[in-house]
Amino acid sequence: MTQGHVAQRRTTTVARRHAALLLLAVAVLSGCTTPDSTATPTSAVSTNADGLTYGSAMGASGRDTEPDLIQVETEDGTVGYVRKDDLYAGEPANPTEAVAQQEERDRAALDAAYAVVADELGVTPDAAAVDLAAGTAALQALREARATGALTAHASTLLDDLVALGAPTVARDPGADDADVAVRVIDAADASGVRLVPVYESDGRTVIGEFPVGG
């Protein structure tokens, strides 16, 4: 599947995020895409009663050769299909658009993170004034600490770093469970870039779930 509904896949470093963005830009210009399904593929692409092809996109040479309904797997393990048009809706047409969209996603993630900070720590940082690269790096540090099991030990320091970018002179609530708040911050930031598209049976009509794209 393109991004499993498990939503556990998160970017690992800021450098890799930028590298992925560069690869996307190259793919846009070349007309090539990576496979859009990691669910166990069907043996072949089939055609339903409406004339729509359905099956796995693994092994497709490009978007034009992918089926109309691309096989994915939902969080509960249900295998279904997303419409190709839904999957690629809003994708950038060129590298400039790709960079602009990534910046929008990074800003939305930062805004979502600071909304949690305001709710949980009693501080309202000025998110709009925060340098985007610095804010993205602070969020990435939280993600990496979570991924390596170091979040509990470093949550306070990492949250302080994030808060200081938008409210350098404001003291935050010292009574909060910093590890729990850090998890909420990460989850909110990651969820900000996700859109849900319908998952269908092979008929392309019967909706059986939702599939997250982005994030």
Image (cartoon, rainbow, N blue to C red):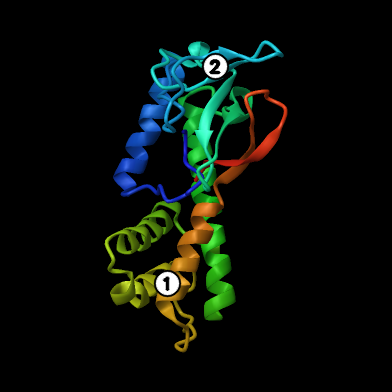
Could you tell me the amino acid type at mark 1? Ala
Residue in the picture at 48% in, 40% down? 102
x, y percentage for residue 193? 54, 47
Closer-to-camera residue (74/143) = 74
Could you tell me the amino acid type at mark 2? Pro
x, y percentage for residue 117? 52, 72
Choose the circle earlier in sequence order: 2 or 1: 2
Q: Which residue is mark 1?
A: 164
Q: Which residue is mark 2?
A: 67
Is 43 drawn above or below residue 174 in the view shown? above
Residue 93, quarter of picture: top right
Whether residues under marks 2 and 1 lie with C-beta atoms below 8 angstroms apart, the answer is no
Residue in the picture at 68% in, 24% down? 204
Residue 43, quarter of picture: top left
x, y percentage for residue 159? 40, 72
Mark 2 neighbour density, 10 Å: few (under 14) some (14–19) many (20 or more): many
x, y percentage for residue 50? 71, 14
The residue sitting at the front extreme is 43
Closer-to-camera residue (170/46) = 46
Q: 198 left or right of 153?
A: right
Q: Secondary structure at mark 1?
A: helix
Residue in the picture at 44% in, 33% down? 39
Q: Marks 2 and 1, Cα distance to the nearest angstrom?
A: 48 Å
Closer-to-camera residue (80/22) = 80
Is 179 drawn above or below residue 37 in the view shown? below
